[in-house]
Image (cartoon, rainbow, N blue to C red):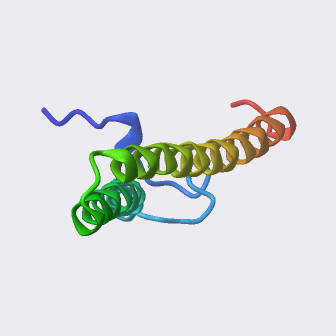
Amino acid sequence: MQVEHEAMRSSPDDNPEGLSPLAIGYMWSTRIMTIALEMGLVAYGGHWLDNRFGTTPVFLLIASALAMVILAAQLMAIIKGADKTAGADQTEDKTRPQL
């Protein structure tokens, strides 16, 4: 018995770009890894500056705050992209005849 999950289906109607489920998974993992690397590298840069100038976690805290701002901007961009896709799906569903 094989159960097919909704996210595993790949049809032109569900996926306007025609991407396979594996490609969609790679796309999301790339987005998540990019955000994690941005946060980590910025925070590490703050730590490095603290070590270089002999300060306590001043630069680390500043860099961590900057990393949070970058995270928020990235997440908002992802949400805006998802909203545009969802809006397009809703308008298509209204005009598409139901079977």
Q: Nearer the viewer, residue 69 or 80?
A: 69
Task: Name the quadrant of the N terminus.
Answer: top left
Q: Residue 91 or 29: which is nearer the viewer?
A: 29
Which residue is the extreme one toward the front? 54
Residue located farthest toward the left when viewing the structure as drawn: 1
Q: Which of 55 and 89 is in front in this view?
A: 55
Residue drawn at (59%, 65%) of the image: 17
Q: Where is residue 44 shown, x and y percent of the image?
A: 27, 60
Measured as percent of width and height from the top left, residue 4 is found at 29, 37
Where does residue 10 sit, x and y in percent of width and height? 44, 54
Of the pair 36 and 82, the residue shown nearer to us = 36
Q: Residue at x 40, y 61 (%)?
A: 38
The image shows residue 94 at horizontal and vertical percentages of 84, 32
Seen in the picture, residue 29 relative to 84 is either above or below; the reply is below
Q: How many labels does the image show?
A: 0
Q: Is residue 18 left or right of residue 45?
A: right
Residue occupying the far right of the picture: 95
**Which image quadrant: the C terminus?**
top right
| Left or right of 34, for residue 94 | right
The residue lying furthest to the bottom in this view is: 52
What residue is rendered at 28% in x and 58% in y? 50
Q: Quadrant of residue 30?
A: bottom left
**Image side of residue 50 versus residue 17, left or right:** left
Query: Going by the image, does 75 lie left or right of 83?
Result: left
The structure residue drawn at horizontal position 56% and vertical position 46%, both measured from the top left corner, is: 69
